Image: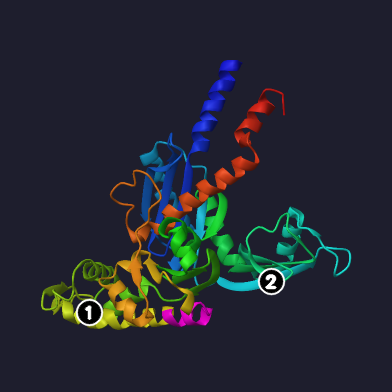
């Protein structure tokens, strides 16, 4: 019997050590398996990538095709890591996401002027009140992100426990999602045979992989240019002050090329990538072959012609991002400027185009935070999936700090008759 228990313990330990991030995108679906090393740092164990199907404008329109893409990505990651994937942290984004700031307040004493020490329960109660906004029946809370506490009008407090006052307030940022769109993501993953441990607003995951603590404190706008949409999150003073989704992404560049050059979508996608990887300023007169639709013969155009199609769309997107930054009210507080990531951030000289539009520094972020990332992961297109793994690891560390024995320890205790 002891030998059986030991085998179970080792098996559970092996499975519990792995952390999986799952990014369901409009263009590609990625599954990333990571494992803490002996130094406690997270490192790559396996990566699976599959072409996404069943998506339109950042939302699922065919559940079966989406689940199939998830399954293919998971199988590739399982083969690379040599482990069976049973659960994952999943990213959620898309045009259905909306962010709003909210406040809550409570009195601490029995009368308005009475004072006492702030307790953890007070923090929980005031946060619950801040979450009590009226939502339409088709929407749900996705993220509750505390900004600061105020005690008798003293602001900027991160942790008020033990402080004395009469009135406790809190400012929070709430991210809401469409119930049906969120559930479709969870259902697609479940149909692929995987349990969803948690869903994460994708720019939060990006931030875990791409931003430094200094950037969050100084103020920074993180912009994830995906296939269907562009997602944004703004940090000032180390906390989230604003979030938004712009319904323009890499797909729109591809469609512009397809229409402008009358070429099939797959060919337009190849040309977009080629333009993004090259220095189009130097390649202006270089000729590129353009396959035509149907039986028509191919044509030849210059990179300059391709730029004439892509640049206006790029400038339009940058202007939409700038308008959203202005709307946030944080424009003058972004000491660290703008950080671009996501597959769309790789479009040619986008950061250089962005700086005059934003009037502040801009850089393209490559994800980090993992050990032994290999050759594929250091790419803006993988920021979300890397961030999801990091987020999942942080959640595990927080859980283990609260429950030192952990889930597997409890299970073993029950097997031994101690639970």
Q: Which residues make up the magenta segment?
A: 322-331
Of labels 1 and 2, the one closer to you: 2
Q: Quadrant of residue 266?
A: bottom left
- Inspect this view and state whether residue 316 appears: yes
Q: Is residue 198 magenta?
A: no
* Quadrant assignment for the C terminus: top right
Marks 1 and 2 sit apart, C-alpha to C-alpha, by: 46 Å
| Number of marks | 2
Q: How is the image coloured?
A: rainbow
Q: Which residue is mark 1?
A: 307
Tell me if 76 is positioned left or right of 326 in this view.
Answer: left
Question: Magenta part mainly helix, strand or loop?
Answer: helix
Please give the name of the residue rendered at 56% of the width and 66% of the height, measured from the top-left corner: 181
Closer to the N terminus: mark 1 or mark 2? Answer: 2
Tell me if 74 is positioned left or right of 344 in this view.
Answer: right
Rate crowding at label 1 as few (under 14), some (14 to 19) or many (20 or more) other CA atoms within 10 Å: some
From the top left corner, tell me how far across and down residue 338 is, in percent: 40, 71
Rate crowding at label 2 as few (under 14), some (14 to 19) or many (20 or more) other CA atoms within 10 Å: many
- Inspect this view and state whether residue 62 appears: no
Q: Which residue is mark 2?
A: 103
From the top left corner, tell me how far across and down residue 183 is, in percent: 58, 61
* Quadrant assignment for the N terminus: top right
Q: Quadrant of residue 3?
A: top right
1 and 2 marks in contact (CB < 8 Å): no
Please give the name of the residue rendered at 32% of the width and 81% of the height, measured from the top-left corner: 356
Tell me if 377 is positioned left or right of 85 in this view.
Answer: left
Q: Secondary structure at mark 2?
A: strand
Please give the name of the residue rendered at 34% of the width and 68% of the height, measured from the top-left corner: 363
Q: Is residue 162 above or below residue 320?
A: above
Q: Secondary structure at mark 1?
A: helix
Tell me if 354 is positioned left or right of 216 in this view.
Answer: left
Q: Quadrant of residue 110?
A: bottom right
């Amino acid at each position: 019997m002891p030998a059986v228990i030991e085998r179970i313990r080792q098996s559970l330990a092996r499975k519990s050590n792995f952390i999986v991030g799952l990014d369901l995108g409009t263009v590609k679906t990625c599954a990333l398996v990571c494992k803490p090393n002996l130094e406690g740092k997270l490192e790559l164990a396996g990566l699976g990538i599959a072409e996404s199907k069943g998506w339109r404008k950042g939302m699922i329109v065919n559940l079966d095709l989406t689940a199939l893409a998830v399954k293919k990505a998971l199988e590739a990651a399982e083969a690379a890591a040599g482990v069976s994937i049973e659960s994952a942290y999943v990213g959620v984004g898309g045009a259905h996401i909306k962010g709003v700031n909210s406040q809550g307040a409570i009195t601490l004493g029995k009368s308005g002027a009475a004072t006492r020490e702030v307790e953890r329960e007070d923090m929980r109660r005031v946060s619950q009140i801040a979450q009590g906004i009226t939502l339409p029946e088709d929407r749900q809370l996705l993220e509750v992100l505390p900004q600061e506490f105020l005690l008798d009008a003293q602001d900027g407090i991160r942790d008020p426990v033990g402080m004395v006052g009469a009135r406790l307030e809190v400012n929070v940022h709430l991210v809401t999602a469409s119930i049906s769109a969120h559930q479709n993501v969870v259902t697609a993953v479940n149909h692929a045979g995987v349990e969803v441990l948690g869903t994460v607003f994708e720019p939060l995951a990006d931030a875990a992989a791409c931003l430094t603590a200094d950037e969050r404190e100084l103020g920074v706008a993180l912009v994830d240019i995906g296939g269907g949409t562009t997602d944004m999150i703004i940090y000032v003073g180390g906390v989230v002050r604003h979030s938004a989704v712009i319904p323009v992404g890499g797909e729109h560049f591809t469609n512009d090329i397809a229409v402008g050059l009358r070429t099939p979508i797959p060919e337009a996608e190849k040309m977009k990538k080629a333009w993004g990887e090259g220095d189009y300023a130097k390649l202006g007169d270089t000729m590129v072959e353009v396959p035509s639709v149907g039986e028509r013969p191919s044509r030849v155009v210059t990179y300059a012609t391709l730029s004439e199609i892509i640049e206006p769309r790029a400038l339009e997107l940058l202007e939409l991002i700038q308008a959203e930054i202005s709307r946030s009210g944080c424009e003058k507080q972004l000491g660290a400027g703008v950080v671009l990531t996501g597959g769309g951030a790789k479009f040619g000289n986008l950061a250089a185009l962005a700086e005059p539009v934003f009037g502040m520094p801009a850089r393209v972020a490559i994800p980090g935070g993992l050990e032994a990332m290999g050759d594929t992961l250091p790419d803006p297109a993988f920021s979300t999936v890397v961030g999801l793994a990091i987020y999942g690891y942080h959640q595990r560390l927080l859980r283990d700090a609260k429950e030192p024995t952990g889930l597997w320890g409890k299970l073993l205790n029950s097997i031994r008759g101690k639970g």
